[in-house]
Image (tube, rainbow, N blue to C red):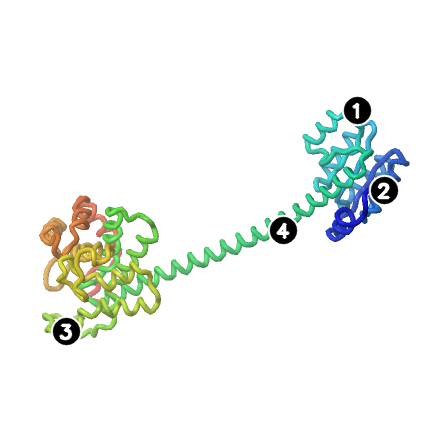
């Protein structure tokens, strides 16, 4: 005989909830009373009935039972239809079928069809109790899964909101960045519209050099947009001087990479962005500034930008000269291969036909106001 206590008594009682109610249907009064007495002795709340009609009234209208135990001898068509209706009306109910061993195939078929959850024999009371506890565990696990699913949906919803906020902030950041650099370009007649164009050139060169991941390309774009941010600290008297700069003024101009890097370093800008700002005037042969770096000492993104910067400078209008065509630009770039420019970057540039570079420039600058309009505004 089973003892109340460690598992079936105290252990189960600790996990009982207000929903752990059992409905027992048994047409044989003696068997039903014995089963009810046995289950009640294990801290289970039992409600019993002896007819299908009485059971249907309770189970079809309310969902306040977690387990239904049905003792059917024999397993007739009307009883099978009854079980189907109960399952359809109350899909969360754990249904345990107690039947004889004379026709096991039909009971197993009901199990396979999902009409019943457990099959047992009324002669094996511990097995009936075990089946009930299994249904309780299933209900508890189902509740946990539903809770986890709700929390997951909530977290997903919050994540989507946070992602949207992050994307909105990124869009605002990008817009602010471009507006800032447009304002800086407008301050210096020689770099009007320059930042957007070199950003596009730089990204194209990066792709030709097999830099294809979106974060790196985006950082190169940001670095290109911000490359001259240090000129904010250069006085207009130097920046807009129409005549050649004297040595002191030139030394001040040469400070702008370091000044710009200092600005972005304070706001913890990404490495590629800072590299372009600090090193965009370094030369491959070591004759550049501010540090005189050479060859691979110069970060790749800065070597890429240096060529993009020169390409735009050669093909843009300047007050002291007319713009030159892309064929001329290519000739100058090739003449400085291995001197001002990294040979790998030069090869990447030359691998693309000049019409493509002209198209990039046109698509980037055709919406900008004309230089003549700019002069009227200044």
Mark 1–mark 2 distance (CA, rounded to whole Å): 24 Å
Taking depth in this image into account, of 351 and 47 the one nearest to the observer is 47
Residue positioned 33% across, 69% down in the render: 266
Corner quadrant of residue 233: bottom left
Q: Earlier in the sequence, mark 1 or mark 4?
A: 1
Judge depth for marks 1 and 4 and give the one in front.
1
Considering every residue shown, the one lying at the far right of the view is: 30
Mark 1–mark 4 distance (CA, rounded to whole Å): 42 Å
Looking at the rendered structure, the number of numbered marks drawn on it comes to: 4
Which residue is tagged 4? Answer: 147
Q: Earlier in the sequence, mark 1 or mark 2?
A: 2
Q: Earlier in the sequence, mark 4 or mark 2?
A: 2
How crowded pointer 4 is (Cα within 10 Å; few <14, some 14-19, many 20+) is rated as few
Q: Secondary structure at mark 4?
A: helix
Mark 3–mark 4 distance (CA, rounded to whole Å): 69 Å
Disc marking residue 36: 2
Is the residue under label 3 in contact with that under label 1 (CB below 8 Å)?
Answer: no
Which residue is tagged 3? Answer: 249
Disc marking residue 102: 1
Taking depth in this image into account, of 202 and 213 the one nearest to the observer is 213
Residue 316 seen by the camera: no
Taking depth in this image into account, of 228 and 293 the one nearest to the observer is 293
Is the residue under label 4 in contact with that under label 3 (CB below 8 Å)?
Answer: no
Q: Position of residue 235 (x, y in %)?
A: 21, 74
């Amino acid at each position: 005989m089973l003892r109340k206590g460690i598992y079936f008594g105290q252990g189960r009682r600790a996990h009982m909830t207000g929903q752990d109610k059992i409905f027992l249907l048994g047409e044989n009064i003696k068997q039903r009373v014995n089963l009810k007495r046995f289950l009640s002795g294990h801290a289970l709340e039992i409600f019993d009935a002896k007819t299908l009609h009485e059971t249907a009234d309770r189970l079809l209208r309310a969902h306040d039972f977690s387990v239904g135990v049905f003792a059917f001898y024999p397993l007739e068509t009307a009883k099978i239809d009854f079980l189907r209706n109960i399952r359809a009306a109350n899909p969360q109910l754990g249904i345990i079928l107690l039947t004889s061993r004379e026709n096991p195939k039909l009971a197993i078929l009901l199990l396979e069809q999902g009409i019943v959850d457990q099959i047992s024999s009324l002669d094996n009371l511990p097995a009936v109790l075990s089946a009930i506890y299994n249904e309780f565990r299933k209900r508890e696990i189902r509740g946990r899964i539903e809770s986890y699913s709700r929390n997951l949906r909530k977290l997903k919803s919050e994540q989507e909101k946070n992602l949207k906020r992050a994307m909105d902030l990124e869009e605002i950041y990008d817009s602010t960045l471009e507006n800032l650099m447009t304002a800086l370009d407008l301050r210096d007649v020689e770099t009007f519209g320059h930042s957007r164009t070199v950003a596009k050139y730089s990204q194209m060169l990066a792709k030709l050099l097999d830099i294809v991941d979106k974060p790196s390309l985006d950082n190169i774009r940001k670095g290109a947009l911000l490359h001259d941010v240090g000129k904010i600290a250069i006085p207009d008297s130097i920046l807009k001087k129409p005549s050649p700069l004297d040595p002191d003024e030139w030394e001040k101009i040469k400070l702008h990479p370091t000044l710009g890097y200092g600005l972005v370093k304070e706001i913890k800008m990404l490495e590629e962005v800072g590299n372009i700002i600090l090193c965009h005037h370094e030369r491959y042969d070591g004759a550049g500034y501010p540090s005189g770096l050479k060859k691979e000492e110069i970060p790749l993104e800065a070597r890429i930008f240096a060529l993009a910067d020169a390409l735009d400078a050669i093909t843009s209008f300047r007050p002291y000269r007319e713009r030159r065509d892309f064929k001329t630009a290519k000739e100058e770039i090739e003449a400085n291969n291995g001197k001002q420019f990294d040979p790998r970057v030069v090869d990447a540039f030359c691998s693309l036909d000049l019409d493509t570079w002209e198209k990039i420039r046109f698509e980037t600058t055709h919406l900008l106001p004309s230089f003549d309009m700019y002069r009227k505004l200044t």
